[in-house]
Image (cartoon, rainbow, N blue to C red):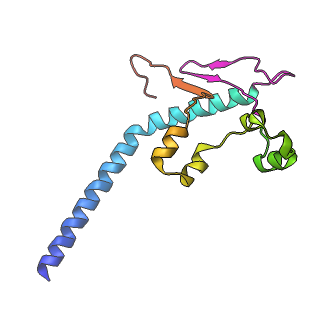
Amino acid sequence: MAKAKRVAKSQQEILNSALTEWATLSQQIAPQVYRMKQLEAQIDETIKAISLDAEGQLHSNSIETETAKVALMVAKVRTVDAKRFITSVAETNRNEAFWDCLWVGAARAEKFLPADVFSTLAEVNTEVRIKMWLKPTFPPTIT
């Protein structure tokens, strides 16, 4: 019983020490967290102020503040439901050009094939939509 009390007391001391350390670190990083939230709000406000022209193009493709930059890309993507498309095209018209119209979303299709078969069929295409980075400040500013 005495050993159990010592263990419990030791565990409580470790917990108290960890909580104290966490509180100290939280206070130390609070200015950086506050500054990050300010930057996020400033960027959000600027992004909301951007408008598109009649063709859906951005008037500006990047936003720059004193300490951060955001580059935006807008891409229009039209899709057609595969099942509706297939049933809407007459079987006599389902030639190679017809099948070239179709594609399969890899994330959902992956579960239907063994990994080795899937990897031979899958193609990887990369599209970047938003890029955001903070500019370094020297010396770092802590407010």
Q: How many marks?
A: 0
Residue sitting at 84 percent across and 39 percent down? 93
Q: Nearer the viewer, residue 91 or 56?
A: 91
Is 103 part of what is drawn in magenta? no
Q: Principal SS element in the magenta part?
A: loop
Is 77 part of what is drawn in magenta? yes
Please determine whether, in this image, residue 24 is positioned above or below residue 74: below
Residue 121 location (% of width, % of height): 55, 39
Residue sitting at 14 percent across and 83 percent down? 1
The image quarter containing residue 142 is: top left
Residue 84 location (% of width, % of height): 82, 49
Horizontal relation, residue 18 to residue 96: left or right: left
- Magenta span: 50-78
Residue 126 location (% of width, % of height): 57, 29
Q: Nearer the viewer, residue 104 or 40?
A: 104
- Furthest toward the bottom, the residue is 1
Please determine whether, in this image, residue 3 is positioned above or below residue 115: below
